[in-house]
Amino acid sequence: MILVGGLFAFGLVFLAVEVFLPGGVLAILSGGCLLAGVVTAFLQLGPNGGALATGVALVIGIGTLYFEFVVLPKTRLIKQFSLTETVSGRSRPAVADGQAVIGAEVVAVTTLAPTGYVELEGRRYEALSQSGYASAGARLRIVTVDTFRLVVTQIKEPS
């Protein structure tokens, strides 16, 4: 009985520390202690003692999760350490609206061999040339919009 109580006590201590120092290692140790306590209870105290220990372990686990995700975020201490603002930056510029730009004429800012940059309405976009090589300054037409780039083809000049 003392061994079962000790394992549950260590499990509770690990859970309490895990709430304030998240990382997962202490939660795994806590779960291991609680599981060892349940197994030990089954071995030492029989089915009734094991069932009781299983119920206690479940109540401890559910109670800890409730405390960590429902009660704790509402406390003044945790609100001081939590981020409340969002970052509005982007890692890549937004791609142009496909339906609005298909057929539009653009100018190559860099050499497209077959990828490079084009300028559309004062903004630079990455582009893929379907017609292969296109030198800087070439006039191109947008054929479609790919996931992160424009697909262009060279405009045929009448001879």
Image (cartoon, rainbow, N blue to C red):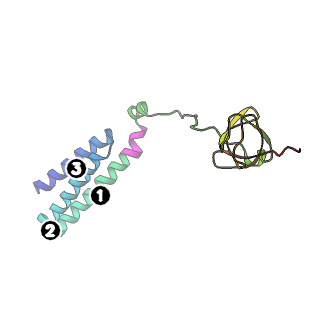
- Pinpoint residue 57: horizontal percent, then vertical percent: 26, 56
Above or below, 40 relative to 67: below
Q: Between residue 19 and residue 87, name the one nearer to us.
A: 87
Q: State the residue position of label 2.
A: 46
Q: What element carries label 3?
A: helix
Say if the magenta span includes residue 146.
Answer: no
Residue lying farthest top?
A: 80
Secondary structure mostly seen in magenta is helix
Horizontal side of 66 relative to 122 (left or right) equals: left
- Pinpoint residue 144: horizontal percent, then vertical percent: 73, 50
Which segment did they paint magenta?
A: 68-74
Report, in whole angstroms, how far the alpha carbon at label 2 lies from the one at label 1: 18 Å
Report, in whole angstroms, how far the alpha carbon at label 1 lies from the one at label 3: 12 Å
**In the drawing, what numbered circle is on residue 135?**
none
Q: What element carries label 2?
A: helix
Q: Is mark 1 on a helix, strand or loop?
A: helix
Q: Which residue is drawn at 14% across and 50% down?
A: 6
The amino acid type, in three-letter code, at marker 1 is Leu
Kindly indicate whether the residue at mark 1 contacts the one at mark 2 (C-beta within 8 angstroms): no
Q: Between residue 147 and residue 158, name the one nearer to us.
A: 158
User: Of callouts 2 and 3, which one flags the residue occurring earlier in the amino acid sequence?
Assistant: 3
